[in-house]
Image: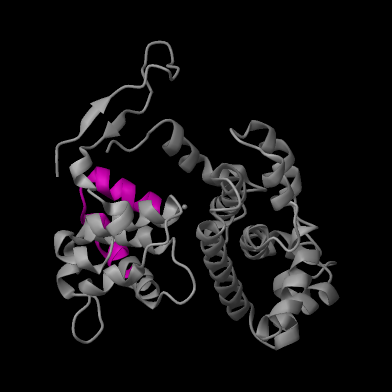
């Protein structure tokens, strides 16, 4: 790979006494070649895990529908990821990040999530500080409550187990309409580089699968993160209470189910991210993406940082005050 050339973007503002502008890093075109048109198994011998996963993630994030089959070359004859990868910290981290743009049916990336999470957590304390910091941030990280009565929630979750069309309709009523996503869009759309009438008509269309998926990520994460706070009142049953009562399961099992529903919603969104490329701008899709991302940050690991923003003070400082040098 050609050495990186680092330059500074003079159009960005700087603070007095300290230049906090992030460097812009560019690479020789030979790094990518014809990747945008020929990233396939034919190239499998030319990439290590780090660069394969990096290229896959970047292409997916730029809305190219590349196949996850490229990762099969990193599995052994028993269908398991090769043991030699367990000490490749950069490769594992790159694969972990790539797995987070997976869609439904990508078993190799489902396996990658479990494989990379286990080994990254195992080795994190043994790494050099810069990589350790980057890894911790990746593993830690890419609202208004809606209807909270049991009847509505039970109708919503009852259709999770088979009646897809009914589920979509019910989710639209209970999740989309009662969420604050339209408020966020009202604030965000005027700042878009391209906000055509067609794009706005698309985001207001029903059912908008990308919008529904984005609000479902938030809904399920919120239900988990705010359960403890809402349970203190004792008067209004939480979403976790309703689901646990209806299906006769524990709170722990309910939380795991909600996590699964959130993961499925991300897969739905990742699918729409690529398939809607011809009908809606990336700017508009990013509004929905960032709504789901905000929910992930606020409610990660069951915390309620929307109500208690001090819980993510460290992450905010890490992003704006202590960026990772690459």
From which residue to which does the magenta span run? Answer: 118-138
The x and y percentages for residue 133 are: 32, 46
- Residue 132 on the magenta segment: yes
Left or right? Give the position of 276 relative to 112. right
Residue 17 percent location from the top left of the image: 38, 11
Q: Is residue 259 left or right of residue 141?
A: right
**Residue name at image x 27 percent, y 34 percent:** 26
Quarter of the image with the C terminus in it: top left
Determine whether 142 is above or below 326 in the image.
below
Q: Is residue 222 magenta?
A: no
Magenta span: helix, strand or loop, mainly? helix
Left or right: 237, with 264 as reference point: right
Q: Which quarter of the figure has residue 15?
A: top left
Estimate the x, y position of residue 143 in percent, counting from the top left.
70, 51
The residue shown at (66%, 57%) is: 211
Position of the N terminus, as image quadrant, is: top left
Above or below residue 318? Residue 138 is below
**At which x and y percent is residue 157?**
72, 78
- In the image, residue 109 above or below residue 28: below
The residue sitting at 28% across, 50% down in the picture is 132
Asked which quadrant contains residue 198, the reply is top right
């Amino acid at each position: 790979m050609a050495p990186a050339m680092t330059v500074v973007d003079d159009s960005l503002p700087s603070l007095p006494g300290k230049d906090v502008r992030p460097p812009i890093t560019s690479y020789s075109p030979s790094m990518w070649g014809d990747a945008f048109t020929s990233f396939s198994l034919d190239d499998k011998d030319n990439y290590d895990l780090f660069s394969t996963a990096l290229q896959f993630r970047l292409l997916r994030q730029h809305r190219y529908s590349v196949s996850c089959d490229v990762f099969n070359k990193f599995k052994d004859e028993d269908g398991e990821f090769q043991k030699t990868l367990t000490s490749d910290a950069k490769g594992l981290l790159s694969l972990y990040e790539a797995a987070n743009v997976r869609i439904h049916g990508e078993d190799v990336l489902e396996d990658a999530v479990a494989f990379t999470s286990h080994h990254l957590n195992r080795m994190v304390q043994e790494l050099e500080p810069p990589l350790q910091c980057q890894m911790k941030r990746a593993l830690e990280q890419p609202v208004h409550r809606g209807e909270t009565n049991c009847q509505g929630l039970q109708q919503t979750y009852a259709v999770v187990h088979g009646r897809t069309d009914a589920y979509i309709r019910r989710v639209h009523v209970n999740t989309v309409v009662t969420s604050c996503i339209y408020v966020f869009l009202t604030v965000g759309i005027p700042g878009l580089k391209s906000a055509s009438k067609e794009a706005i008509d698309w985001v207001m269309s029903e059912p908008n699968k990308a919008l529904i998926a984005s609000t479902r990520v938030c809904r399920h994460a919120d239900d988990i993160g705010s359960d403890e706070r809402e349970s203190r009142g004792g008067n209004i049953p939480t979403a976790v209470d309703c689901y646990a009562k209806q299906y006769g399961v524990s709170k722990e099992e309910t939380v795991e189910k909600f996590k699964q529903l959130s993961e499925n919603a991300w897969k739905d969104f990742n699918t729409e991210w690529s398939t809607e490329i011809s009908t809606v701008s990336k700017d508009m899709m990013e509004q929905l993406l960032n709504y789901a991302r905000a929910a992930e940050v606020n409610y990660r690991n069951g915390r309620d940082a929307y109500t208690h923003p001090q819980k993510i003070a460290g992450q905010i400082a890490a992003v704006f005050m202590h960026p990772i040098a690459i």
